[in-house]
């Protein structure tokens, strides 16, 4: 057979083979398609029901896109917009690690604009009238043209989800006041964490133009120390008891107070409140002089009738003048900054250590061994720390 004939014959076979292969593929595809459409068959022209409204999806996407940038937040805060302030505080409070850099950028930009306020800490046992006092005091301040921000450090708020939230009903007037900003306490796992976030919220509020910052804390636990470490003036609210005013009051809190205010001095309570005032006054004389040189004052007031409220503000103004003249005011703020630096490092180191997977694996068994006296607590601590450091390398 001539070569060219052989070639054309084999190429003819090849073509036939390819063609039948193509047919086979087509059939398989068609069969699959049929199988696919058969179960989901739909008459043409009948649209699928909308389980999720597409307009709602668009709205959500629009909102997501509108998440402000750090620069937008900074500009908003510096022009006094409380919406930007609220969002920035939420950012600072976020535990999402991706938010950290943005939060730090906002805080750093706000820092040069902060510092121009008076920070007042308010403490007292539950029911003493802190919220009612803040409502009355805050309204007095805004009536003087001040811009008031109310923050809270409340370790119990992790359980109650922000006591100031409930308090907003006690601060009815202040909530509506355009010159006031009320923020429920940050939630967090540790008091240190909650306090640090409040400390950063102060910076943001000040940059937004709030010149008086009120920080409420419940007079239980360590929260007073944390608040004392971030304010210029510390006010202890009390109510009159049955002549045993000093009983159950922690010495540490008395030492921290720049003013003791006996609240609920109204109606039948006025006489008792005055007696309590005298007793606290006597007790304060026994305390050593404060570092600021300021002699703590004792006064009475009624957060309900507003009696004595303006006088409290006058006392604070006197204190600020006194502390600025002897430079304690600025020195104290420097000390506080340093305290927060170290406190944040301590907090971070501790969190990292306890959250480390290896430590979490070993901690319970180590605790047990130490409790049973099988291991010295110091040696065990050293061992865990060494393991932690080795993993960090
Ligand atoms: N008579 C009188 N009652 C007051 C005064 N201040 C507060 N109260 C009342 O005391 C109760 C407690 O007041 P709050 O302002 O909620 O006290 P608080 O210290 O904020 O309480 P917690 O948020 O639970 O720690 C409320 O029923 C108030 O109406 C006051 O000056 N006089
Ligand atoms: Mg309250």
Image (cartoon, helix red, strand yellow):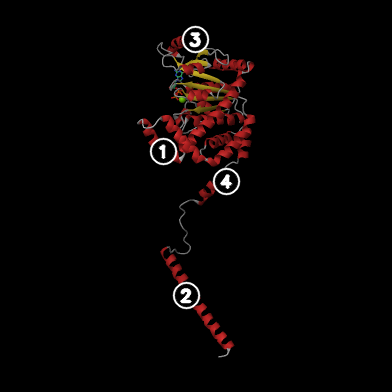
Asked if 303 appears above or below 34 in the picture, the reply is above
Say if mark 1 contacts mark 3, CB within 8 Å: no
Q: Of label 2 and label 3, which has the lower sequence position?
A: 2
Q: Residues within 10 Å of mark 2 (few under 14, many from 20)?
A: few
Cα–Cα span, label 2 and label 1: 63 Å
Q: Earlier in the sequence, mark 3 or mark 4?
A: 4
Residue 197 can be seen, yes or no: no
Q: Which mark is residue 362?
A: 1
Of the four image quadrants, the one with ligand 1 is top left
Mark on residue 286? 3
Q: Which residue is mark 2?
A: 24
Q: Is residue 81 left or right of residue 30?
A: right
Residue 65 marker: 4
Q: Of residues 162 and 44, which is closer to you in this image? A: 162
Say the numbered circle drawn on residue 281: none
Residue at figure coordinates x 49%, y 27% from the top left: 153
Asked whether the residues under the numbered discs 2 and 1 touch, taking CB atoms below 8 Å apart as contact, a structural biologist would say no
Q: Secondary structure at mark 2?
A: helix
- Earlier sequence position, callout 1 versus callout 4: 4
Please state the horizontal and vertical placement of residue 21, each as a whole percent of the image. Answer: 49, 76
> Which mark sits nearer the N-terminus, 4 or 2?
2
| Label 4 vs label 2, nearer the camera | 2
> What is the C-alpha distance between the residues marked 1 and 4?
44 Å
- In the picture, measured across the screen, residue 210 lies left or right of residue 46, that is right
Gap between marks 1 and 3 measured at Cα: 50 Å
Q: Are marks 4 and 2 in contact (CB under 8 Å)?
A: no
Q: Residues within 10 Å of mark 4 (few under 14, many from 20)?
A: few
Q: Residue furthest bottom?
A: 1
Q: Which mark's residue is nearer the viewer, 3 or 4?
A: 3
Q: Nearer the viewer, residue 299 or 258?
A: 258
Circle 3 — which element?
loop
**Which numbered mark, 2 or 3, is in the foreground of this view?**
3
């Amino acid at each position: 057979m001539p070569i060219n004939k052989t070639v054309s014959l084999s190429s003819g076979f090849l073509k036939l083979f390819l063609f039948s292969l193509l047919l086979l593929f087509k059939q398989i595809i068609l069969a699959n398609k049929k199988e696919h459409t058969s179960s989901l068959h739909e008459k043409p022209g009948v649209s699928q029901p909308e389980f999720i409204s597409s307009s709602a999806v668009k709205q959500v996407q629009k909102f997501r896109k509108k998440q402000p940038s750090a620069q937008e937040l900074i500009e908003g805060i510096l022009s006094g917009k409380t919406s930007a302030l609220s969002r920035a505080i939420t950012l600072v409070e976020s535990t999402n690690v991706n938010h950290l850099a943005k939060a730090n950028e906002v805080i750093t930009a706000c820092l040069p604009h902060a510092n121009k306020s008076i920070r007042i800490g308010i403490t007292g046992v539950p029911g003493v009238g802190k919220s009612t006092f803040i409502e009355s005091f805050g309204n007095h301040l805004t009536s003087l043209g001040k811009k008031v921000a109310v923050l809270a450090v409340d370790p119990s708020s992790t359980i109650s989800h922000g006591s100031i939230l409930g308090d907003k009903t006690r601060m009815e007037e202040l909530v509506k006041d355009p010159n006031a900003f009320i923020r429920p306490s940050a939630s967090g796992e540790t008091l240190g964490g909650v306090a640090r976030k409040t400390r950063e919220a102060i910076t943001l509020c000040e940059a937004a133009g709030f010149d008086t910052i009120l920080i409420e804390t419940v007079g239980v636990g360590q929260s007073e120390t944390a608040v004392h470490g971030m304010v210029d003036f510390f006010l202890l609210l009390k109510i009159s008891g049955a002549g045993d005013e000093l009983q159950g009051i922690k010495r540490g809190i008395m030492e921290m107070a720049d003013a003791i205010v006996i609240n609920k001095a109204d109606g039948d309570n006025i006489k008792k409140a005055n007696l309590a005032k005298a007793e606290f006054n006597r007790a304060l004389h026994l305390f050593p002089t404060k570092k600021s040189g300021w002699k703590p004052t004792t006064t009475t007031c009624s957060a309900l009738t507003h009696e004595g409220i303006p006088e409290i503000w006058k006392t604070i103004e006197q204190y600020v003048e006194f502390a600025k003249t002897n430079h304690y005011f600025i020195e104290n703020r420097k000390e506080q900054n340093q305290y927060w630096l170290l406190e944040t490092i301590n907090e971070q180191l501790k969190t990292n250590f306890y959250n480390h997977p290896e430590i979490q694996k070993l901690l319970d068994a180590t605790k047990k061994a130490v409790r049973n006296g099988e291991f010295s607590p110091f040696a065990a601590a050293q061992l865990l720390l060494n393991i932690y450091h080795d993993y960090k390398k």
